[in-house]
Image (spheres, coloured by chain):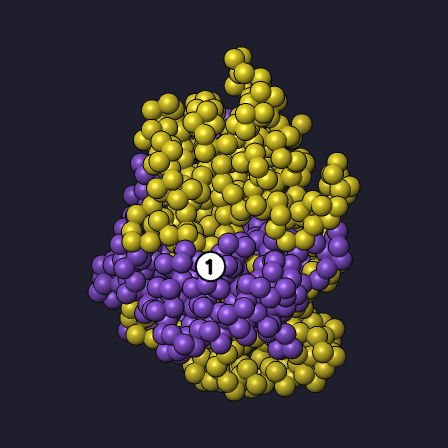
Chain colours: A yellow, B purple
């Protein structure tokens, strides 16, 4: 059996939809025992999101990988008592209830840490615990609007554009995963106690829009929608080829920008100080961009990529999902894994990233049916004696 | 950026730059008084030293530095460290607890591993650009370093996994191999599984999502923008009431999420028509009191003025000896007992040379002077 970095770490995933559960998925990929708690009636709404096959949600299958699935009704006192029993036997609890709900249910960090002082609790909400919007509902879309992302995405003069996938949730999930690791390291390698992590989904995305705040603070400039360009470097765009394909390229490093100019036959400009200096090049962004657009429009995609690769210029085809999955390099790296699933047969999903040499992540199984692991967790782990799992299910607690 | 996330939470991060060129990031984006602003932000809390790793006389100090470090982060083209004998196999022979992160465009193996790769390339190849933008328009790249940022966060997670494993069990280090497009690919959600199971290829939809409607940006009477997502049936019904859109709820084209997705264009038109009746503040009030989730599309000025951002301390002011004071995003996430904090903004090149080479790895002043004269430091 492969050695995993988080073997022996038990995580209770009491979150729903995307951000909080996805943080737990990352931990599960590296060997943590993740127990997903869902309300007995219908389970996590993520089970019904997006496309289905044979009545099974495909997104759920991927996000639910490696997790044990139990049901627990936290709206009834018996359910909350059972949760406390599980908390006492776990390392990490992940929730995304709004702050007033946690208080009403008596499940605040202070209350739970009395049962388990080593508990690491990750509390993910749209706006965080504290501040005027703390009690508001929120989805990733609102965060993508408020973080400044939508304002700078899209064509100049066009509407602000939201991302076509769950960006805010994804980034917050990653931040949640590494912050849980900070807290576990603090506890287990440094002899610290457990602690509460207050993670607003808003904040990690704001954090990534690095340049906006410092630049506004010092130059008063408010970035607007630049289309495909990016104010910090040129050339940088997606260009259409003669045969109707799109190619993205970037001269982010000065050496690459100069190689790019030479590759399109403009060695003269690579030698000219007005074009070789990155700051001066930025002042001539329109002109340089047009040179590249024209050169690429006169060639096929294959020709362009051949020449740029030979000259050591960073460029790539704009792939759709079919192009991506048939790419040689992607296949060679094993970025997708084919997994057998008892509900719908074989499925291809993304393999875990990043790759660790000694304790790699892995996909053991995909998302399981609602309550699939009730017997194991309540019967074996909690060793319930007074009630059977079946009784509790009949009472609506599980 | 990966180093910054670790430095935010107290790791002593030593940034090694080439003695004459420095990190190219110093020349990126806007500068003030000749000081790169993006560099200030990304290198906060780090110590900066200079060392020419390609010079044979730079190897000695490099080895001594590595002996004394827990983690090495590098982003040279695959093969470069091997040439300098600073690769993981050479280094971990003497130091089995070493953790090393290798960030590259395409990863350490596979047919493209020797190619030049940047974030833009990763954004195109991962499928991000293809699904971003408007139908019929060009695919759209992100207006910030999205692939780099997601790689940095995955890297921080990877380093913590390895540190934890080393401290809590194995005592051994790990090599972490990260390609710039792999993090973004993971975040792109159900595209892979949808294509695999149903043959679906997601195309450009503007601000819409393929699995929920309504979801878009809309213009208000005062020419500002808001974002709305009707992620659940009840949210959709609240939106229709709050915006007083007649007949919307009895129209069979909009009765459930699936039919709304099929008629998303008409639905967006109805919502847009309704919204031009009120200015943004009023629209947001109406939607908030109806319990419908909506948010303003903020630019950077709005962010700096918003009471919630201010109350959470999301923007910090850092004193800096080059720029005076600088505002930047505060540390996230917040940890109760071992919180992160910003100690200083990105320092000038070589600021900590003496502290690191003399005080830490034990060169004497003369040796340091000699390395500096030869341009190695």
Describe residue A148's horizontal placement relative to residue A381 as left or right. left
Quarter of the rendering occupied by the C terminus of chain B: bottom left
- Regarding residue A350, the answer to whether it shows in the image is yes
- Counting from the top left corner in percent of width and height, residue B262 is at 66, 65
Nearer to us in this view, A393 or A46: A393
Nearer to us in this view, A338 or A54: A54
Quarter of the rendering occupied by the N terminus of chain B: bottom left
Q: At 30% from the left edge and 74% from the top edge, which residue is drawn?
A: A220
The chain carrying label 1 is B
User: Could you tell me which secondary element the residue under label 1 belongs to?
Assistant: helix
Q: At 46% from the left edge and 50% from the top edge, which residue is drawn?
A: A172
Write down the residue under mark 1: B238
Q: At 72% from the left edge and 78% from the top edge, which residue is drawn?
A: A244
Quarter of the figure with residue B233? bottom right
Quarter of the figure with residue B195? bottom right
- Counting from the top left corner in percent of width and height, residue B360 is at 33, 42
- Badge 1: residue crowd in 10 Å (few <14, some 14–19, many ≥20): many
């Amino acid at each position: 059996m492969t050695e995993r970095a988080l073997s022996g770490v038990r995580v209770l995933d009491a979150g729903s939809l995307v951000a909080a559960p996805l943080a737990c998925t990352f931990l599960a990929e590296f060997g943590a025992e993740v127990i997903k708690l869902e309300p007995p009636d219908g389970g996590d709404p993520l089970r019904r999101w997006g496309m289905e096959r044979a009545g099974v949600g495909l997104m759920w299958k991927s996000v639910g990988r490696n997790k044990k699935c139990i049901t627990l009704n936290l709206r009834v006192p018996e359910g909350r008592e059972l949760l406390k029993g599980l908390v006492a036997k776990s390392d990490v609890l992940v929730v995304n209830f709004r702050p007033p709900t946690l208080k009403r249910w008596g499940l605040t960090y202070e209350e739970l840490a009395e049962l388990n002082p080593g508990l690491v609790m990750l509390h993910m909400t749209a706006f965080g615990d504290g501040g005027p919007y703390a009690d508001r509902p929120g989805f990733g879309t609102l965060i993508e609007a408020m973080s400044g992302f939508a304002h700078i995405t899209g064509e100049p003069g066009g509407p602000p554009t939201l991302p076509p996938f769950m960006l805010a949730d994804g980034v917050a999930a990653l931040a949640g995963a590494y912050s849980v690791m900070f807290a576990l390291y603090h506890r287990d390698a440094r002899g610290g106690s457990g602690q509460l992590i207050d993670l607003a989904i808003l904040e990690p995305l704001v954090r990534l829009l690095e340049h906006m705040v410092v630049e506004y603070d010092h130059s008063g400039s408010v970035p607007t929608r630049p289309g495909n360009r990016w104010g910090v470097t040129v050339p940088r765009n997606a260009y259409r080829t003669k045969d109707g394909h799109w190619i993205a390229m970037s001269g982010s490093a000065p050496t690459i920008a100069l190689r790019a100019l030479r590759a399109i036959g403009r060695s003269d400009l690579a030698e000219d100080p007005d074009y070789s200096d990155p700051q001066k090049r930025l002042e001539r962004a329109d002109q340089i961009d047009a040179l590249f657009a024209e050169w690429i429009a006169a060639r096929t995609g294959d020709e362009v990529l051949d020449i740029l690769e030979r000259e050591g210029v960073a460029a790539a085809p704009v792939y759709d999902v079919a192009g991506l999955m048939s790419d040689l390099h992607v296949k060679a790296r094993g970025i997708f894994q084919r997994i057998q699933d008892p509900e719908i047969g074989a499925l291809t999903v993304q393999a875990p990233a990043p790759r660790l040499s000694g304790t790699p992540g892995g996909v053991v199984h995909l998302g399981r049916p609602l309550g699939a692991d009730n017997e194991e967790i309540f019967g074996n782990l909690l060793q319930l004696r007074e009630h059977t799992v079946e009784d509790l299910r009949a009472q609506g607690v599980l | 950026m990966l180093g910054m996330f670790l430095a935010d939470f107290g790791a002593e991060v030593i940034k090694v730059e080439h003695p004459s060129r420095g990190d190219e990031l110093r020349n990126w984006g806007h500068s003030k008084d000749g000081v790169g602003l993006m560099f200030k932000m990304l290198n906060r809390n780090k110590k900066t030293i200079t060392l020419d790793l390609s010079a044979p006389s730079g190897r000695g100090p490099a080895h001594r530095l590595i002996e004394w470090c827990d983690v090495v982060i590098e982003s040279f083209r695959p093969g470069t460290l091997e040439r300098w004998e600073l690769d993981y196999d050479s280094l971990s022979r003497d130091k089995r607890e070493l953790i090393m992160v290798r960030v590259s465009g395409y990863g350490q193996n596979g047919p493209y591993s020797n190619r030049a790769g940047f974030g833009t390339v990763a954004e195109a190849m991962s499928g991000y650009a293809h699904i971003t933008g408007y139908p019929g328009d060009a695919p759209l790249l992100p207006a910030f370093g999205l692939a780099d940022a997601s790689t940095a966060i995955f890297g921080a997670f990877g380093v913590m996994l390895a540190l934890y494993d080393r401290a809590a069990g194995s005592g051994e280090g790990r090599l972490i191999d990260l390609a710039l497009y792999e993090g973004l690919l993971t975040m792109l959600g159900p595209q892979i599984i949808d294509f695999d199971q149903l043959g679906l290829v997601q195309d450009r939809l503007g601000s819409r999502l393929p699995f929920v409607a309504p979801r878009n940006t809309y213009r208000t009477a005062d020419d500002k923008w808001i974002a709305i997502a009707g992620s659940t049936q009840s949210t959709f019904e609240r939106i229709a009431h709050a915006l007083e859109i007649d007949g919307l709820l009895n129209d069979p084209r909009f009765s459930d999420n699936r039919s709304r997705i099929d008629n998303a264009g008409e639905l967006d038109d109805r919502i847009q028509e309704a919204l031009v009746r009120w200015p943004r503040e009023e629209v947001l009030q109406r939607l908030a009191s109806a319990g419908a989730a909506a948010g303003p599309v903020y630019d950077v000025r709005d962010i700096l003025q918003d009471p919630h951002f201010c109350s959470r301390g999301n923007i910090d002011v850092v004193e800096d000896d080059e720029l005076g004071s600088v505002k930047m995003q505060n540390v996230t996430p917040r940890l109760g007992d071992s919180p992160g904090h910003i100690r200083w903004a990105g320092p000038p090149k070589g600021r900590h040379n003496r502290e690191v080479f003399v005080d830490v790895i034990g060169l004497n002043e003369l040796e340091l002077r000699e390395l500096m004269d030869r341009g190695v430091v």
